[in-house]
Image: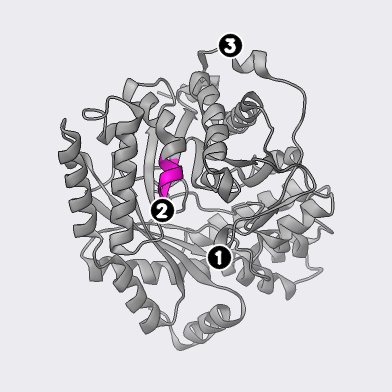
Amino acid sequence: MLNIFEVSETNKMIEQENLDVRTITLGISLLDCIDSDLDKLNEKIYGKITMLAKELVSTGNDIEKEFGIPIVNKRISVTPIALVGGAACKAPEDFVSIAKTLDKAAKEVGVNFIGGYSALVSKGMTSADENLIKSIPEALAVTERVCSSVNVGSTKTGLNMDAVRLMGEMVLKTAECTKEADSLGCAKLVVFCNAPDDNPFMAGAFHGVTEADAIINVGVSGPGVVRTALTKVRGENFEVLCETIKKTAFKVTRVGQLVAREASKRLGIPFGIIDLSLAPTPAIGDSVADILQEIGLERVGAPGTTAALALLNDQVKKGGVMASSYVGGLSGAFIPVSEDQGMIDSVTAGALTIEKLEAMTCVCSVGLDMIAVPGDTKASTIAGIIADEAAIGMVNQKTTAVRIIPVIGKGVGETVEFGGLLGYAPIMPVNSFSCEAFINRGGRIPAPIHSFKN
């Protein structure tokens, strides 16, 4: 239970420091909807989602009002659709019909995103996997709330380079299909290595096959709270710095635990995990970059940035795991460019490059996230960036991801505006030397030697 001092402290964090519960995500298994008839499959999917999620948004709103805790998003994740649609979908356009059904269901229940238009292809692709992947550009162009993800590798299986090459092509095609909206479709598409089954954050959320029929996962966020706490210990040594981050992460996670338990009880759906990630927004004072600069960097990207991020990520995890029985998802510090004003400022100042961001992803939660690049970037170059990031995840036994946006018709020096939580981003330069011969080899990169632990 929270005591009166904690309540007062929490209210201050909410009112002055941008503390919020970023999302309540309802995970729904669609395995019992599988049918060889496409019309029946779509009917079952729509029926199950709208039945289980009909009170999700109103429940979140009620909790928000009663406890005074902002709950920014209510979302749904579903079983990877490549698995659900395999029996009925014989071509990419068949999968697009399921995307439309998911979008319709999301609008009906009022959630802002629905994730799980996904394929898990870390070792190989079935015909259903390939058809779903090839349908992604059209699916994201004709829907508003559907998010897509593809897992192309893991520490246990290595990297599926055929899938990596295909995803390079699909990212570019998605950009083309949504070019009238500054290639916005790519903001709803993420490529993973070691994707977790219980991630509540978009665009990478899906409901893993090892999960229960339905589950409540909550993602918390408090970059502003952490930064404010650190302003009180300026000049102190690393021990004091680390203790401050841990204590603050504990408090933030406790808020998420409270909301998760309450949502679970009211909806009658089991509680899954708390994802204790520091997820920034474009709002001033809600930036992971600001935390790193408060730690002692002039700008993110300066020497010492990777070490500062490693420290932050580790202390957030250490503090958060003490506040909840079940911590999962991604859990750590996100470093998206467009969604973090401090990151945007560092790119604009010339302090931060894609190469430095890649180094930072070795020690953070996710990867190269919400990065805008020139629209004439080659598919093979995008695939090479995906391969590099996936290799970091594979070798380091961690989740990594790429959400990259080639903005058709724009180049380095220009800016793209996405709006809302997606923010805006300067177009960043990419290495112009080719990796096409490497990407076109085909096959798999084997798993690292330390993966053999049986």
The residue nearer to you, when weighing 237 against 427, is 427
Instruction: Point out the stretch of residues depicted in magenta.
Output: 139-148
CB-based contact (under 8 Å), mark 1 and mark 3: no
Local packing at callout 1 (Cα closer than 10 Å; few below 14, some 14-19, many 20+) is: many
The span from disc 2 to disc 3 (Cα, nearest Å) is 35 Å
Q: Residue at x 58, y 43 (%)?
A: 179
**Residue occupied by mark 2:** 145
Q: Quadrant of the N terminus?
A: bottom left
Q: Which mark is residue 441?
A: 3
Locate residue 244 relative to residue 129 in the image: left or right.
right
Q: Is residue 47 above or below residue 448?
A: below
The residue nearer to you, when weighing 58 against 378, is 378
Q: Which mark is residue 115?
A: none
The span from disc 1 to disc 3 (Cα, nearest Å) is 45 Å
Indicate which disc, 2 or 3, sits on the residue closer to the N terminus: 2
Q: Quadrant of the C terminus?
A: top left
**Residue occupied by mark 1:** 249
- The three-letter code of the residue at mark 3 reads Arg
Locate residue 451 relative to residue 396 in the image: left or right.
left
Query: Do we see residue 438 in this rendering?
Result: yes
Locate residue 313 relative to residue 20 in the image: left or right.
right
Local packing at callout 3 (Cα closer than 10 Å; few below 14, some 14-19, many 20+) is: few
The span from disc 1 to disc 2 (Cα, nearest Å) is 30 Å
Query: Do we see residue 450 in this rendering?
Result: no
Indicate which disc, 1 or 2, sits on the residue closer to the N terminus: 2
Which quarter of the figure has residue 26?
bottom left
Q: Residue at x 39, y 37 (%)?
A: 118
Where does the image place residue 127, in percent across and percent down from the top left? 33, 21
Q: Is residue 205 above or below residue 257?
A: above
Q: Residue at x 83, y 50 (%)?
A: 351
Q: How is the image coloured?
A: one colour
